């Protein structure tokens, strides 16, 4: 009996688990090595656009995740005073891209992906390092937990500060600071009823979104020096920066406890990698193409990576050819959007807001236009047939 090909995934986040599940479905013997003690994600929530949902269809959980969609009716962009710059709706998004935008807790997606793997496939509290990327004549090797593993494929899914990437491309400069920091909260807000929205100020943004489980996900971003933290606590910092912005922002801040607020500086790969693979080792997600969160595509592109990798299997040059141009273009677009919505000049902000309102009044909302060429992506299929769950 022929032994199944072995795949070791370094990193148990969304991209790593999706890659493990996709490879497992293709008959690979998969082991996922995660250095954290559990799979509980640090991130509060994740937005899944139709492109990622179609990738999840390949894994068989797309419709289950679509059922968690909470965004109904109007949404869009606002000013700190509450004026709407651009409006859109769930129906408009579905009509434009063939499916909804879904916002859900990261923990929910992690749990669904982990359940697709066989028992024992995920090993937590295991720090792994790439010992040898392998080549056509020899397998790749990974050292972890005092053991050494051999595999026909190693997947580096170890995030923006990827050690696997550093081993494959030691001459690459790595991630750089994007110039802004972010805060996130996922909490119940009693009596909160509002349309999903993002608000753009001067060097500041805020987003507030209701979830299907009744909680509210809010995030903020602001230009700030790298490594800066509040002198008291991050809730107090949010109150100083956003406390006088429009409703429901004050109610969200009032409901949050200091320990509910997560803060992280944003780093990205300003210089694209020369390839997303070397030898028998491949990179996915933030390890391959970390980007600012301004298009909400970081996790989405990781899920795309996973199903494309499983489709190509050991043909890693084909994987790079399929993914490098797309992810590079989306990362560059994310940087351009960050420059727009994090603008700090009063004159530039006034011009930006006027242009956004005018463009949106003339046609489909700017919010949706930003996803053209992104959300309309479909997974590759060797048979040329779409998944039964896709429209």
Image (tube, helix red, strand yellow):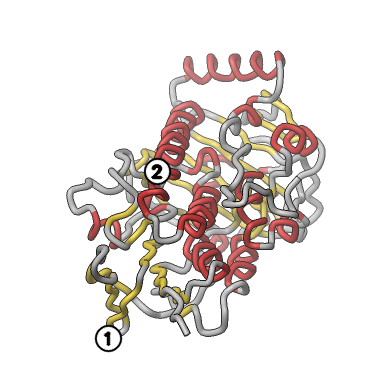
Q: At 68% from the left edge and 38% from the top edge, which residue is drawn?
A: 197
Q: Which residue is mark 2?
A: 321
The picture places residue 361, in percent across and down from the top left corner, at 71, 16
The picture places residue 2, in percent across and down from the top left corner, at 45, 81
Disc number lying in front (2 or 1):
2
Query: Above or below — where is 108 with respect to 76?
Result: below
Describe residue 332's horizontal placement relative to residue 254 as left or right: left
The picture places residue 77, in percent across and down from the top left corner, at 65, 30
- Closest to the observer, 52 or 315: 315
Q: Which residue is mark 1?
A: 146
Q: Is residue 317 visible?
A: yes
- Closest to the observer, 347 or 232: 347
- Closest to the observer, 242 or 355: 355
Q: How would you rate the neighbour count of disc 2 (Cα within 10 Å): few for under 14, some for 14-19, many for 20 or more?
A: few
Query: Above or below — where is 38 with respect to 161?
Result: below
Residue 138 occupies which quadrant of the picture? bottom left
Say what secondary structure mark 1 lies in: loop
Q: Is residue 236 visible?
A: no
Query: Above or below — where is 239 with respect to 306?
Result: above
């Amino acid at each position: 009996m022929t032994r199944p090909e072995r795949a070791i995934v370094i990193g148990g986040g969304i991209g790593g688990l999706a890659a493990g599940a996709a490879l497992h479905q293709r008959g690979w013997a998969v082991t996922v090595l995660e250095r954290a003690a559990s799979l509980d994600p640090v991130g509060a929530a994740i937005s899944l656009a139709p492109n990622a949902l179609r990738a999840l269809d390949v894994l068989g959980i797309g419709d289950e995740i679509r059922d968690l969609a909470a965004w109904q009716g109007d949404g869009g962009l606002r000013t700190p005073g509450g004026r709407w710059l651009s409006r859109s709706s769930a129906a408009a998004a579905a009509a434009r891209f063939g499916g909804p935008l879904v916002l859900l807790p990261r923990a929910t997606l992690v749990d669904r992906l982990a359940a697709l793997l066989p028992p024992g496939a995920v090993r937590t509290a295991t720090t792994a390092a790439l010992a040898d990327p392998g080549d056509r004549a020899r397998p790749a090797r990974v050292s972890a937990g005092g053991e050494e593993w051999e595999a026909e494929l190693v997947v580096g899914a170890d995030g923006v500060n990827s050690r696997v990437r550093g081993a494959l491309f030691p001459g690459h400069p790595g991630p750089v600071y994007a110039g802004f920091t972010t805060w996130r909260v996922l909490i119940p807000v009693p009596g909160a009823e509002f349309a999903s929205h993002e608000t753009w100020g001067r060097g500041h943004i805020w987003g507030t979104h209701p979830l299907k489980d009744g909680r509210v996900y809010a995030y903020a971003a602001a230009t700030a020096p790298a490594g800066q933290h509040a002198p008291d606590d991050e809730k107090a910092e949010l109150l100083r920066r956003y406390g006088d912005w429009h409703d429901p922002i004050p109610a969200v801040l009032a409901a949050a406890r200091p320990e509910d607020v997560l803060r992280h500086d944003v780093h990205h790969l300003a210089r694209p990698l020369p390839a997303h693979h070397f030898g028998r080792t491949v990179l996915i997600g933030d390890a391959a193409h970390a980007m600012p969160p301004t298009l909400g595509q970081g996790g989405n592109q990781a899920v795309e990576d996973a199903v494309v990798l499983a489709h190509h299997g050991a043909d890693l040059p084909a994987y790079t050819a399929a993914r490098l141009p797309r992810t590079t273009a989306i990362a560059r677009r994310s940087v351009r959007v960050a420059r727009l919505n994090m603008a700090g000049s009063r004159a530039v902000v006034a011009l930006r807001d006027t242009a956004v309102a005018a463009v949106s009044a003339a046609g489909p909302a700017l919010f949706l236009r930003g996803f053209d060429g992104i959300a309309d992506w479909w997974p590759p299929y060797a048979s040329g047939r779409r998944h039964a769950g896709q429209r």
